[in-house]
Amino acid sequence: MSLAIPIMSHASPIRSFFVWIGGLTLILIVLLGAGLFLTPYGPAEADFLNRLATPSVSHWFGTDHLGRDIATRLLFGTFWSLGLSLMIATIGLVIGTVIGLIAALSGRGGDYALMRLTDSFFAFPELIAAVTVAGLFGPSTLNLVIALSVVSWMKFTRLARSLAVALSECDFVIQARLNGLNRWQILWRHLLPNVIPSLLVLWTNSWSRTILAVSGLSFLGFGVQPPQAEWGAMLLDGKPYMQSAPHVMIFPGIAVLISVLLINLAGDLLRDLLADPR
């Protein structure tokens, strides 16, 4: 996904993007709310007489190895898979943006120190570093959030810093300095509003990647723990039954696929809107 976006007025594209995301989120919430109120099953409600049942009228997506309704667990799993990944991606956005902008304005020494710190975190692959952190602290939802947050901010730092350095040479920033604004006023009034659009494009990409990371760590046993209905954990539960009851893994996999696809499409839409507001 290209992040080369020209500097321009971003108000209209950003507004269109949030309208699109807001509409998608509202539809999702309505569907989830309707499903959660209409489903007669609980996410942890076992029915051992209907273990590994195939999709039917009573169980639209079938049941798992404990007889739990897969459709209900997918609905509840949305709050874990999408909610956790959204929180982690937003944490990375905030931390990375703050560090990147501070690096751009802190002079040569501060810039060098902060960027070398960022490079040191980049030295380790994200998923391997997250598995290491989660393994050190033990498997739990909190440790999953900490592990992925630790490795999610560096790309935002690099982008924010590079954009802020480029913007510092623009005429409107130079004019702000001549008008007596200090560096923090310039950061808040001029740099931050102009770097946020590009960071939002990266944020959508980070959100989709984090969904895969959350599901992947849960599939490895380092993430959300049973009996919580997280999509990666559901894939792990269904792994032994892939040949005899493939639907136990197919539907959680489709949920991950569709979520990542929709979020990436939202990011592509924002990129296109910013590149050509017409």
Image (cartoon, rainbow, N blue to C red):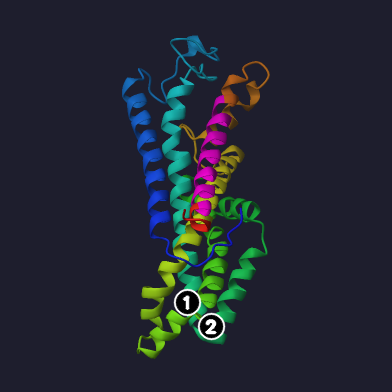
Looking at the rendering, the stretch of residues picked out in magenta corresponds to 251-272
Q: In this figure, which residue is indicated by the disc labeled 2?
A: 110
Is 5 situated left or right of 84 in this image? Answer: right
Give the prevailing secondary structure in the magenta stretch: helix
Q: Height in image: 69 above or below 257?
A: above
The secondary element bearing badge 1 is classed as helix
Q: Looking at numbered disc 2 in the image, what kind of residue is underneath it?
A: Gly
Taking 239 as reference, is 157 above or below it? below
Residue drawn at x 39%, y 79% as measured from the top left: 186
User: Would you say residue 110 sits in the magenta stretch?
Assistant: no
> Badges 1 and 2: C-beta atoms under 8 Å apart?
yes
Task: Rate crowding at label 2 as few (under 14), some (14 to 19) or many (20 or more) other CA atoms within 10 Å.
Answer: some
Q: Which residue is mark 1?
A: 102
Residue 253 in which image quadrant: top right
Asked if residue 215 lies left or right of residue 17, the reply is right
Q: Amino acid at mark 1?
A: Ile
